[in-house]
Amino acid sequence: MSSAETTEPAPLHVLQIVGNGIVGGVERHVQTLVRGLQRHGVRATILSPFEGSLSSALRAAGCPVYIATLEDAMEWRALLTATDLIRRQQVDVVHTHMFNAAFLGSVAGSLTGVPVVITEHGMQVTAEGVALARLTGCHLVTVCTAAYTMGLSLGLPEDQISLIPNGVDTQAFHPRANGQAFREQIGVPAGVPLVGMVARLSREKGPDLFLQAAMLVAAAHSEAHFVLAGDGPMRDGLARQVEALGLANRFHLPGLIADTSAVYAALDVACLPSRMEGQPLCLLEAMAAARPVVATNVGGIAEIVELGETGWLVAAGDVSALSERILWLLADPERAREMGQAGRQRVLEAFDIRKQAAAVAALFRQLVQSRRRQMRTTLQLGRVYGQARVS
């Protein structure tokens, strides 16, 4: 084997620009990806819109974090901060998450001559996003086929768009023998069926639909309990509805849980009745924890859940079908266990963070090498032109 074949890839420095500083799906994805990329010689500096739990978690992971206001209408101070970081810290690639971050990152990358990768985490790309990528030469990464094909149909060339599915840490999210600790925390006895949803409590995730389905399941199953773990703008309204429906003793709202793997360990069935999605991490985490799932067939969810093998899919907004599939799984624990095991195998094969990080790292290196070749070609042409003028 030659020395060239054994040489480790050159280290890369990536500026990760995050459009929000909360800990939601996109932000948890950034944390997991940053750790995964470190194994491939890619270190990260973070630009976040404000201090919070995300910035604290990333600093704890060893990443320098800088703060700059990221509005939809880009501020000059944010642009100056970004370009200064790229130049002073010798950044090789800019990687952005959410449109406000993409807007800032694409302009900063253009001004500094650094390649930019925009990850679209949703179920579709917008005409504005495609126009931004075409105007600035950024590379667009999509997480589901629907968004990928839409990007192509809107005019992005194949060499400027990639499909790289989301990934989860299958070592952190794995089957646990006992979820009793979390059950005790929320007051659910051992052996009692527990159906749960882990997500941000906002309309696109459908927590109100989960509550409606829980009401139907509770009427048919006298022992079942329900947990909605997360926080968001709908929490207070949901709490009032739980009281009004008389479900306070069986429907639990513990708020934001730092270690969601403990939640999945306690569940018999995991649900996600989203109205809009890309490739939801919470669904992948539940499957990695070997829990059977019931979800709506929107966005990239059908690319995750194998119908009847790893869980069930229902139409968006179909609360009746959602409750029926939950009851079906509760009535057949052995089949539910088999679906959960099949779900973990599915995640191990297709959605492990190690595979996603390897693909993203390879894309970064490809773009950096391409940019360097372009710069060498431009330099050589400049020399030829200069010699021609002299002669």
Image (cartoon, rainbow, N blue to C red):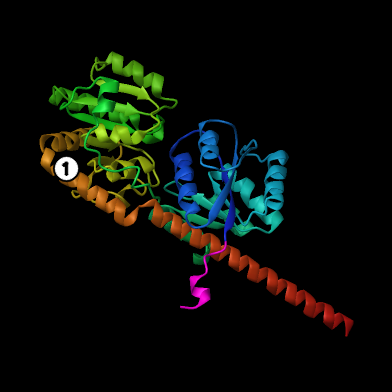
Give the answer, above or below, for where 8 lies relative to 185. Answer: below
Residue at 74% in and 76% down: 380
Which is nearer the eye, 364 or 389? 364
Circle count = 1
Residue at disc 1, secondary structure: helix
Q: At which x and y percent is residue 216?
A: 19, 26
Helix, strand or loop for the magenta stretch, by majority: loop
Q: At which x and y percent is residue 348?
A: 30, 53
Q: What span is colored magenta in the figure? A: 1-10
Residue at 62% in and 37% down: 71
Dot 1 corresponds to which residue?
337
Q: At which x and y percent is residue 165?
A: 40, 54
Left or right of 385? Residue 71 is left
Give the answer, above or below, for where 177 lies relative to 161. Answer: above
Q: At which x and y percent is residue 324?
A: 17, 35
Displayed quadrant of residue 203: top left
Left or right of 370? Residue 347 is left
Residue at 71% in and 52% down: 87
Give the answer, above or below, for where 79 lies relative to 49. Answer: below
Residue 7: say if magenta: yes
Q: Is residue 368 visible?
A: yes
Give the answer, above or below, for where 230 lies relative to 104. Answer: above
Q: Quadrant of the N terminus?
A: bottom left
Which is nearer the eye, 349 or 78? 349
Residue at 28% in and 21% down: 186
Q: Is residue 20 visible?
A: no
